Amino acid sequence: MPTPFKALAELCEKLEATKKRLVTVSLVADFLRTLEADEVEPAVSMILGRSFPKWNPLTLDVSWATLSEAIKQITSADWSVFNEAFSESVDVGSATKVIFEKSRVRKQTSLLSRALTILEVRHNFEAIAEAVGVGSRQKKERLVRALLSQASPVEAKYLVKVFIGEMRTGFHEGLMEQAVSKAFDIPLEQVQTASMTVGDIGEVAAIAKTQGLEGLSKVRFRAFRPVSLMLASMANSVADALKEHGGTSAFEFKYDGARVQIHKLREEVRIFSRRLTDVTESLPEIADLIREKVSANEVILEGEAVAVDSRGVPVPFQHLMRRFRRVREIEHTAEQIPIKLYLFDVLFLEGKSLIMLPYAERRKELSRIVDGLELSDQLVTGKVDVAEKFLKRAMGAGHEGLMAKKPDSSYTPGIRGKRWLKIKPVLEPLDLVIVAAEWGYGRRHGWLSDYYLAARDDKSGELWELGKTFKGLTDQEIIEMTRRLKELTVNETPRRVVVAPKIVVEVLYNEIQKSPKYKGGMALRFARISRIRDDKTADQADTIQKVREIYESQFLKKGRYKTE
């Protein structure tokens, strides 16, 4: 029997109200057991705030302006009710629930509405995502309005949360892996391994439901299904990296570019960004290079795409992002902003996963299958002075610093650890989310130019502000940022707008200082935006826990008041 979407929404209400992780895992595990096989992946995706599985290129592409207009038309409510509810909860979904509950029109029509099911919601999402081309905006608006008109208040709350990608129940992917393990009586390690291989816990849950442990044990990498990337931690120096890696490390240039995962199956090549979105159309020359220079029939590679000038010297990151966003007139743009590719890893080759091989062996395999393609500059050494000279060479060539990779390390998709380390000779930048903005004064009148920056809480998913900045962007970037933020606005006063947390920026700062003004008790001093990270989603932004670690690390070389 089809499962009502309301059951999923009510589960999410319980998750939001429950702080005990073991309880939330049990709640989700119990729910997963009740689902039909074809409902499992859509349900898992929606509980995690996704409309589609990670590998699916479809996007809803629905702005808050469209959502809010649909809500106004459905409820015929005074919008001040929404604003009041939002000011109390600072949550778009919760405010939507309130306005649905107080709508007389909605109460009258809801009696005639047929209950939504999980699969009907997925089918509606697919129809909305597939509405493209001429007239697509109007079609999306009609479809969104039709979907929300069938929803009860609690369903509307979580539909809106999925639309804007801000679930905020605190139930993250790691907990979902535990829930899948518990629901289908499969060892957690097996679930985690399958999740790393497939790249989507929803699909893993569906396999666990229908095929159990035997099915998960047969999971393999597949071409054109992007895999979560292995993540690196920071190191203060090459000496620290060598100590962490037991005396020897593979140092590589850290390029000021965008990480790409490249899949090849015979003559077909597809390129995925750090966000695991398909960017092949934006980088056709890279696809051509892979077809021409990589001898393997089936392979998954990793590398760094760097924008360069006519001399081959790296140019600022924002120019590279112009390439990633461009899908039209790409030949002209490619001439203006050429791309250089540096490969550094191979994860899958001719039907076999290589992630358990030591990094040094994977690098040898990579060298063997490429002909005429440049690999990342590398130096394997155990000598501090030699590594420091290599760092100076990287900086002199216009790159960010070094990566240090433990030669015997396996590849762990989606996991941050110390097997890979970043070494930058500056205070570590932070990737933060813009959650609000203020209108500028004087020359910046009419522009949203003061940006409130937030880090996410790794436990709850909540975004914690760390201050604001008006520095770093060019006038042209501010104009474009204003346009984007206006599309994401969910609440507005004459001075300030609150926006859906979609835009990530890299932020430089002089230090992190104590501040009672913000919930986390910390604020960035002299913050300035160094670049816009369109290659990252909000859930890939840095955490408040990381900010706190950096704050504490400042006192390794500084004095400290006893009250801190």
Image (cartoon, rainbow, N blue to C red):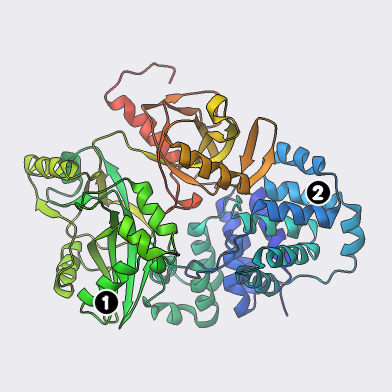
For the point 33% across and 27% down, the residue is 554
Point out the tag, 1 or 2, that comes first from the N-terminus.
2
In-image side of 92 versus 49 (left or right): right
Q: Percent x, y for residue 243? A: 17, 43
Quarter residue 81 falls in:
top right
Q: CA distance from mark 1 to mark 2?
A: 54 Å
For the point 61% across and 53% down, the residue is 167
Which element carries disc 2, helix, strand or loop?
helix
Q: Which residue is mark 1?
A: 291
Q: Residues within 10 Å of mark 1 (few under 14, many from 20)?
A: some
Give, as a three-letter code, the residue at label 1. Arg
Of the two numbered discs 1 and 2 in the rendering, the one whose residue sits closer to the viewer: 1
62 above or below 286?
Answer: above
Q: Residues within 10 Å of mark 2 (few under 14, many from 20)?
A: many
Q: Which residue is mark 2?
A: 99
In-image side of 212 versus 381 (left or right): right
Q: Percent x, y for residue 227? A: 38, 67
